[in-house]
Image (cartoon, rainbow, N blue to C red):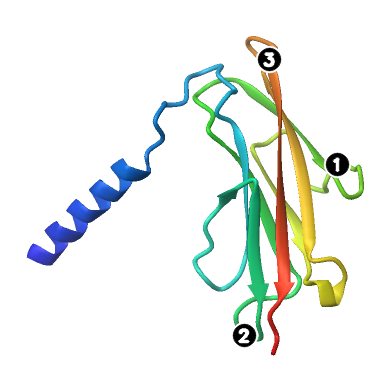
Amino acid sequence: MKANKMWALGAMISALVLAPGQPARAGDLSNAVLTCYVDTFALDVPEAFTCFSTWKPGAALNPTGAYFQVAGLGAGNYSYAWLDVETNLVPAGCGNQSACRKSISTETRNDGEATLRVTITDLDTGASKNAQATAFYNDGYN
């Protein structure tokens, strides 16, 4: 029981330490960023702007998915327009939603990089902001 209380206290302290200084406000796009992670068998954590992952046999699939998501927005009414920067096309399946998945392969299978940009528009004010992130998937086979 004491261990559970200590774990809960540690989790609460961690949450307070990691909390941003300014809370997101509705209609405020200034804190909006694009996060990403490359899906492996590890506990993958989204990173803002750039994310890295390494393929090793038995540790991840190749190809796998690169996941992109808008973070830092308060409650509000937003639209999302996605663009694959490498192809200058809208990624398949990435409609008007705050998250997008793109297939990614290591450089041994053709590329190892995915860059997406999203235009976020506040539908109540008309304000908009572009956010971009790049996912890298490297070959770690030895």
Q: Amino acid at mark 2?
A: Gly
Q: Which residue is mark 2?
A: 58
* The N terminus, quarter of image: bottom left
| x 61%, y 36%: residue | 33
Q: Which label is found at residue 13? A: none
Which comes sooner in the sequence, label 2 or label 3?
A: 2
- Residue 121: image location, x then y, percent: 69, 21
Asked which secondary structure carries label 1, the reply is: loop
Name above or below for residue 48 compared with residue 66. Answer: above
The answer to whether any part of residue 35 appears in the image is: yes
Q: Amino acid at mark 1?
A: Val
Q: Gap between marks 3 and 1, in whole Å?
A: 21 Å
Which comes sooner in the sequence, label 1 or label 2?
A: 2
Q: Which label is found at residue 90? A: 1
Q: Gap between marks 2 and 3, in whole Å?
A: 45 Å
- Residue 61: image location, x then y, percent: 69, 76
Q: Gap between marks 1 and 2, in whole Å?
A: 32 Å
Question: In which quarter of the view is residue 55 placed?
Answer: bottom right
